[in-house]
Each structure stands twice: as structure tokens, then as C-alpha cells.
Image (cartoon, rainbow, N blue to C red):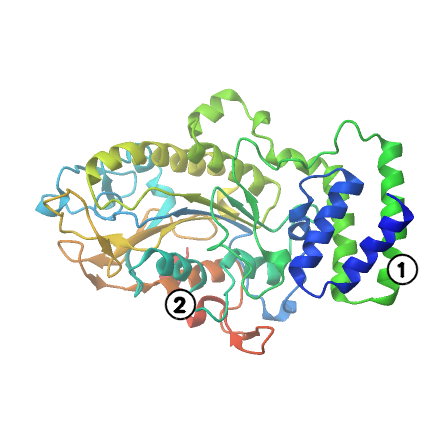
Amino acid sequence: MTASRSRKSRRAFARGTDLQDRRAFLSQTSQGLLGVAALPTFDRLLPAARGSDDSLLGTPTAHRAIHIYLSGGLTHLDTFDPKPGNAVMGATEVIASSADGIQLGAGLPLLARQMDKVAVINSMWSNQGAHQQGRYFAHTSYELRGTIRHPSLGAWLSHVRGPANPTLPAHVLIGGGTENASAGFLASSHAPLPIGDPEAGLQFAERPTEVDDEAFERRMRRLQRMNREFTEHHANRLTRAYDEAYVQAVELMGSRDLAAFDLGAEPDLLRDVYGRNKTGQACLLARRLAEHDVRFVEVTVGGWDMHTDIFDALDDRLPEFDRALAALLADLDGRGLLDDTLVIVSTEFGRTPRLQADRGGRDHHPKAFSCLLAGGGIKRGYRHGRTDARGEEVVEDRVTVKDFNATIAAALGLPTEHEFHSPSGRPFTVANKGRPVAELFA
């Protein structure tokens, strides 16, 4: 890089008052000087700034969380809340599980063997019946607004507790869109690190082979010289964060923790047990990240919006989900990780008991649906709440989305009553004043 180009780059950066401009500059600089194409996401690898002091923190029952989000609206009747003998079941048969009094739809035979590790919440309730709004509400506990973006639970955990492993991000998203799991109004360092393909892992995180140690050090020194003048004259939180980001990215490049993203290190037999598909391999990657102390991993599994031909659609979707979740629970338990890892299975709403005769599907139904929790201090083999004989209305122990998220927050030691303030000064709480469900804890 010539001295003239270096000066132009500094001037361009100094002029940029917009965050996107600064990110673009840093992305370009990182690729040009370091040869690291993955660094546009480097700010998410920063050690997260703590959002509160330890006196605000509760006593966690879980050290970390794996959230499997079923996007589209999982049918509760055909999975976690079946109604044996009722015509609403259609073609779905019912099977017993390893937990007394808990039955499942017959499409979940492997999970049925693991239900003695799980708490089923059959009394979920939401006031959001559209997908975008429902997904946003499920992740943030706030209604979607055009004026502000709210943090999801993984971002809150990153903000309040910081990373457990200083080399790795506190928040990772596998296979999903960041429009739901996001930092919201918190610093971008709390946004999830996105992994699109679990088998590809964290791409471009290793130094290119054509850049040897000498060349790498030379480029780093040049970068430091280029930035020194600017940082001396503009010493503030953002510039310090960018300096730390480069250090963090370089540490990650040389860290053994990069192995956490490598599914090739797993035995072929275990990869087969999880299932050789995106859902199975995403859950296996989530377990590897949990082993390396990533605080919050979300796995997004789409395809549950079944307005037509629901029974054929379930035959396609349930087997890989059944295999992946059953394998994850058994694997975590066998490794001694389930006791302090909270496994969450959630969705935005359920589906109607009434089958649409003309198309054989179920429509959106936020008034009653089911979610799961396992590990991390949660009761095992427990069923909470009840719906009526058709699965249409909650009749016992209703749990709102806010309450469900407050329960997750409490398990992770997050304060649910403390007010945090957005950059504009508006007060917000984790889970939006939801109340943790005490009965779910062991």
C-alpha cells in the first residue's frame, strides 16, 4: 500500500461518522492487510462489554444454552400435546414416552426415549399470530415496532454476563436469519456470529497459506502505523473496540478453539447418529460449541408452516428433527453437560386443531401450543400446564411467551426486573416483565 493510499484510507475513516461506513472500512482493511476474508464479522468476536455489575445477577442453574428454534409454527397436537382418540388428531398416532404421563406424536419415537430428561410446557400462549411478528416476539418478548429493535436472549446473556470463553463469541446462530436473533439496541458485539452451513463451520478464519509469519507480522505493523495517528486523535470507546477486535481476531486465528467449529473432528458414527442433514449436523455443532463454553447457541430449523398436506409434511420434517434432538439430549447427558446446559425447543405459535378439509393442513394458532426445556436445573420428565380435549385453549397454568423467556433468563442468571436503557434512554427489561415459572425448576 502506498503512502498516498494510506493517507486516503485514514481520511476516509476519519470522515466516516456512520457505523456502516466504519464497518466497511475495517472490513476492507482487514482483507487487504491481513488476508482474512472472515473479518467483516470480527466485531462479534469481541469480549462483550458487561452491562451490569455482579450484584444484579441471579444464581444461574445453567451455564450455557442451546436453543432449537422451529420456525413456522410447530403443530402441538401432532408432536408434544397429542389428544388420543380425538378426531382432531387426523392421521397422527400417539406413543408413550420414557416419562410417566407424557405422550408424543408417533413421529417422534427417538425423542420419546429421552423424555425422562425433558420438561414439556403444554400451556404456551401468545398474542402474535403472524410469522414475522410471532418470531420477533418469541425471541425478544417485545412486539415488533418500526422505531426500535430489541435484543434477543442470547444478546442479553452476552451483554450481562460476557463470554465464558474469552477467545470465542458468547452468541452463535446456526442456520438462521439474524432478523430474529439480534443485538437489538445493544452493541453489535452482542449480535450472534452467524454460521450458515454447520459442516462448513467458521469459514475463512485461518490465515491463508500464502501469508507466512513474516508477511503477516509485516502487515500487522503496517496496520498499526496506519491506525496510530487516528486513534491518538480520536480515543474513544469505538476506536478502542476496533483495536481490541483486531487483537481478538488474530488470537482466534491462532487459537485451538477454532477446532470447536470443525465437525470433521467427530467420529463418523456419531455424525450418523445425529443425522447427516443440516438439522442433525447443526445440533452436533451446537454441542461442540457448548463444550467450548459458548454461552448461547441458537439452531434455526425451518419448514414448520404446514397449511396444506400436514401429515405428508410431518413425514418429511419430523424424522431429522427427532433424530437430532434425541441425539443432542443423550450426548449432552452422556458427557455430563446436560446438568448445566439448558436446552430450549420453541416456536412462534401452534396450529389449529381443526384440519382444513380442502387442503389437509392446520392454520396458525397462538392461543395454545407447546415448548420444551431440558437440563440446566429444569425438572426432568415433567409436564407443565394443560390444554382442553381438542388442544384449542389453555385450561391450566398458562405460560405466556414472556414468562417462558423469563424462565430461560432466570435459569441463566439474568436479571428479569432490572431496567436497562437503550441509547435513547428508554427503559427495558429482559423478557419484558415476564415472570419465571418456578414450578419448572428442579
**Is residue 224 in view from this perspective?**
no
The answer to whether residue 43 is left or right of residue 408 is right
Mark 1 Cα shell of 10 Å, populated few (<14), some (14-19), many (≥20): few
x 86%, y 32%: residue: 213
**Is residue 104 in view from this perspective?**
yes
Residue 204, labelled with which disc? none
The answer to whether residue 307 is left or right of residue 22 is left
Mark 2 Cα shell of 10 Å, populated few (<14), some (14-19), many (≥20): some
Amino acid found under the numbered disc labelled 1: Glu
**Is residue 308 or residue 385 the one in the foreground?**
308
Amino acid found under the numbered disc labelled 2: Glu
Which comes before the other along the chain, label 2 or label 1? Answer: 2
Label 2 close to label 1 by CB (< 8 Å): no
x 47%, y 34%: residue: 331
The relative height of residue 262 versus residue 184 in the rendered view (above or below) is above
Percent position (x, y) of residue 31? Answer: 74, 42
Q: Tell me the element at label 1.
A: helix
Quarter of the C terminus within the rendering: bottom left
**Is residue 186 or residue 416 the one in the foreground?**
186
Percent position (x, y) of residue 222? Answer: 88, 46
Percent position (x, y) of residue 66? Answer: 48, 46
The answer to whether residue 141 is left or right of residue 219 is left
Quarter of the N terminus within the rendering: top right
Mark 2 → mark 1, Cα distance in angstroms: 45 Å
Residue of label 2: 143
Residue of label 1: 229
